Image: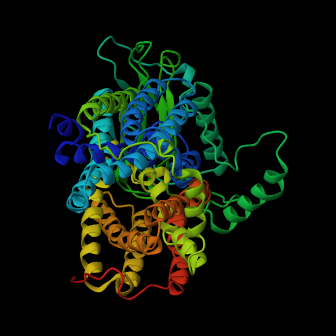
Amino acid sequence: MKNNKTKSRNAWYWVPSLYYAEGIPYVIVMIVSVIMYKRLGISNTDIALYTSWLYLPWVIKPLWSPVVDILKTKRFWIIIMQLIIGAGLAGVAFTIPAPNFFQYTLAFLWLLAFSSATHDIAADGFYMLGLNEHDQAFYVGIRSTFYRFAMLTGQGALVVLAGYLEVATGLPPVNFEMNVKPGAAATQFINPDLLKMQRDQAELHFKMYPENPVMAAGTTAPSFADSLKAEVKNWNIKNGFYQEIKSAGEVKKEGKSWWASAVADPLEDIIRSLFGPEEIKKGSSETGNVAVLYFYLNKKPEPDEKPVFNFGWRRGDQSISLVEGIRFEFNENNWDKPALALIQIDPKLKTASSAEFEGRSGNIPLAWTITFLILAGLFVIFFFYHRFMLPKPESDVPASSKGDINPLKEFFKTFASFFKKKHIGISIAFLLIYRLGESQLVKLASPFLLDSREAGGLALTTGDVGIIYGTIGIIALTVGGILGGVLASRHGLKYWLWWMLIAINLPNTVYVFLSYVMPDSYYIIASCVAIEQFGYGFGFTAYMLYMIYVSEGDHKTAHFAITTGFMALGMMIPGMISGWLQEIIGYQHFFIWVVIATIPAFIITYFVPIDSEFGKKTEK
């Protein structure tokens, strides 16, 4: 009796915690990393490209799943992977403040991705070994629920925590109203080296000059506005207030490859000329008036204190906009210099008007370091908890200990049988194309919400994104998924397939609306995100059911793992180019492209054969 107690354990003690632990690293690698890199100033091109590469471990997961079966027990893999995940999270935390943080943190995120994918293989296998068939059916809803809780924690609570820490570690915000008046004095550019800055020994805070800015309505010469913008930009770069983040087409390096010279650059030029955002035509005799603002610290910061100042339009007349100086990084080397920003008005604005601007600051690297350290501590707890709480099923033994079969030979036989299925070519195309639009949207949704309005975004705070996208959005996603499952069980997959296809694609148009209207209402933005996520949850039900449908027959578990690889591949490849494309054509045209990219899914779905009875609830 004592031995049985050691080998078995009430599933409530380990199933919820196991699948909660399974969901956390996935959402960190796929979603939270995007938000973190955006807040740390990485370009959309690099964010989309490199975080999409992180899908690769899930793409090739079926290829190394035999290793988990052959070597050691599933229990061993779960426990050791949780320890490695904790070490990877700690590695991200400690390298965020480093000068080359992007390369270092990506290396640790790769470790997280491979460890998480391996953990998935072991956990799903262990679930079937640790429970009998009845309990497997009973706890399937429990495991899904706690996986969703993990997503809520990652996209919601952790992002909100990071946003709170950004604010808590920051300096008081700078708020002011830019007034435009006819007949006001013309802009006079003051040499930043000659600016008389007011110093004091109060708590560290930002100051602004002039304190009550006023600019003249009307126009000025384009040559003057262009030269002033160049002067502001060069000053900020020279003094280290921000590093010039260039898109792929703007990076000019000697000794370009044949591919870049013959294909990539010409292609980008064509896309930019045809679909890029409209620019002010050169040669115009007049452009809107401009004004320079100066921001500086009242005293020298501590050596480890590097406040980041995010500046942008908040509300008021959108004819008054920020054209240069969105994000400044202050430190002990440039604190005694002012950072410059340039405001410009629409040349058609001739009457008095105003707009409110805000500068928010925070120690963003410190905020995200603390967040990842908390996560690392959480996985150390998971490691010790599951070390004692996971049962020890007698069937959980490595395949290498079984002398009657050749696991590797069986794997290749099983793998080959998947590609011999009827209509497998159409099935694979469906798995790759069904989410073509969503695969690009998901990489740019958070950057769009976070980006300044001057860059085409909605200028939300990190905490706002955690609530809107990571909490309200996840709840809507979950409700949509539950509703989709209920309806599909009544009439079957074939009946609901087209409705779910429409649901996952049509709501993408809300981002077209947001990018053109640019609402500043929190409720409108949250409603739009909720609509899109509800549609995604509802429509994704068809995708999951089709994966099960394709996997029917012998080796259904292994074949389902293969379909998950194609699912990840369908997200990885389009996602890699999405940031590059967005930076060429802008958010507005990018979201229109996302809607256009949904068309192939409608075409391939027409050819997908599905049994009309599949998915319907049947009585035994």
Q: Position of residue 491 (x, y in %)?
A: 29, 86
Q: Vertical placement of 490 versus 174: above or below?
A: below
| Horizontal arrangement in the rendering, residue 172 relative to residue 403 (left or right) | left
Q: Position of residue 509 (x, y in %)?
A: 42, 72
Q: At 64% across and 47% down in the image, what residue appears?
A: 247
Image colouring: rainbow
Q: At 43% across and 31% down in the image, what residue appears?
A: 84
Q: Position of residue 528 (x, y in %)?
A: 32, 65
Q: Quadrant of the C terminus?
A: bottom left
Nearer to me, 451 or 374? 374
Nearer to me, 323 or 100? 100
Is residue 356 at all visible to an observer of this figure?
no
Residue sitting farthest toward the front: 404
Q: Position of residue 220 (x, y in %)?
A: 58, 50
Q: Quadrant of the N terminus?
A: top left
| Horizontal arrangement in the rendering, residue 158 relative to residue 405 (left or right) | left
Nearer to me, 294 or 166? 166
Q: At 56% across and 76% down in the image, what residue appears?
A: 421
Is residue 98 at all visible to an observer of this figure?
yes
Label total for image? 0
Asked which quadrant contains residue 548, the reply is: bottom left
Asked which quadrant contains residue 501, the reply is: bottom left
